[in-house]
Amino acid sequence: MRRGTHVQYSPDTIWIDERVKHLPLVERVLSRSSGSRVEYTTDPKQLIQEARSRPDARTAGKHKLLLTRNDGAFFRPCPGTPRYLCCGYQILDAAENCTLECSYCVLQTYLSNPLMVLFANTDDMKRELNRVFRRKPQRRIRLGTGELTDSLALEHLTDFSELIVPLVERYPHVTFEFKTKTDSIENLLARRPSPNLVVSWSLSSEAMIASDEWKTATLARRMSAAQRCAEHGFRIGFHFDPLIVHDGWEQNYQKVVEQLFHAVPAEQIIWISLGALRFPPSLKPIIQERFPRSRILYEEFIVGEDGKLRYFKPLRVELYQKMVEWIRELAPQAFIYLCMESSDVWKKVFGKAPRNNCELGRMLDERC
Ligand code: SF4
């Protein structure tokens, strides 16, 4: 696997489900993938079964792109995590799996299909979104594509933003977030900024990006992309998630905070989220096998109330308090929230906590 700067994804094989071969998205992807082998299938389930049975399934699967139909719903609530405060985010499933390689990525256990999947029936997706957005126009909807994939990792093949942005722009009560670790922003820069679009970057220290976020854009490239989007007029979000304890984490994260406010004026930052490393126990052997040089498992973990492994509470509180202090020093009014944390931790960090998920959701809605 290749570390370092973001390399645009080019699958070695593209599998096309016969049911979608006539659709425009398929033509577009094919016209931009001259180096890929193209195969057709009438049985994607069998294909997935075969891919799953390979010993190196998770690594090999990412090099194969399956263009297929989503026969279910595209839009659904973020599952969050039980017993911790979650923000009422909604997910748009336009693709599944990710071309990037973060050691801690939960998709490695969450997805049973190791292939990179892109849903080509975008007209169905648009119909569903129009239906959902019209249903309760008085209710704010925050949604994004960054949960089961990176929002912009396939942009050079799909122009997905050109499909979603004009649709979202018609609904002022909808806020759409592109969440990424790439710098694939050219399509976005070709558009007028719209108040219901947010472009967000997941950030970490340079050291962690080099060791545990393979194939992603370097920190400098992410910052430069965020700066260009801000200068263009977009609202910008940042996610320090996961925050990882590592050698020099205090200096390293403080430096990232400084770089962030150097790149983007505080008033253009809609939100900054913080989330300490957490993962289901089933991910541990996968990290050990696929990323043997990663050091993220060296800290001690406890089993949280949601069954996930987390740092001890005092360490999580310390991580958050320091981050909040460094952020507030440079931007006293910055809106900061914790992702999937307990009320208790919220109170220790901020002196207060949202009463429940609805209140946290409302706080974020007000930012929109
Ligand atoms: S960018 Fe996100 S979805 Fe992609 S591998 Fe990293 S953690 Fe997973």
Image (cartoon, rainbow, N blue to C red):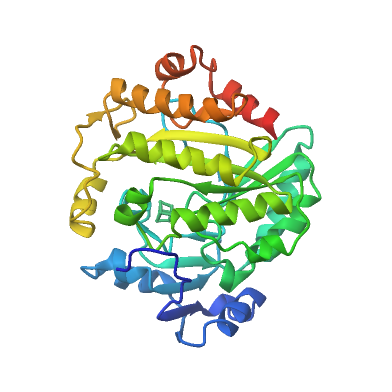
Image coords of residue 182 (percent x, y): 50, 59
Residue 293: x %, y % from top left:
19, 55
Query: In this view of the protein, which residue sits in the foreground, 87 or 258?
Result: 258
- Quadrant position of ligand 1: bottom left
Whether residue 15 is situated above or below residue 239 in the rendered picture: below
Q: Give the quadrant of residue 228.
A: bottom right
* Front-most of residues 46 and 306: 306
Which residue is found at the position 21% from the left and 47% from the top? 295
Residue at 47% of width from left, 24% of height from top? Answer: 325
**Residue 42 relative to residue 2: left or right:** right
Residue lying furthest top: 351
322 over 352 or under it: above or below: below
Q: Quadrant of the N terminus?
A: bottom left
Q: Quadrant of the C terminus?
A: top right
Identify which residue is drawn at 53% across, 26% down.
329
Is residue 164 at all visible to an observer of this figure? yes
As drawn, is 3 to the left or to the right of 194?
A: left
Q: How many marks?
A: 0
> Can the viewer see residue 83 in this picture?
no
Q: Percent from the top left, x then y, of residue 302?
A: 23, 28
The image quarter in which residue 45 lies: bottom left
Q: Is residue 338 above or below residue 240?
A: above
Where residue 23 appears, as percent x and y from the top left, is 64, 76
From this view, report whether residue 138 is shown above or below residue 224: above
- 280 displayed left or right of 300: right
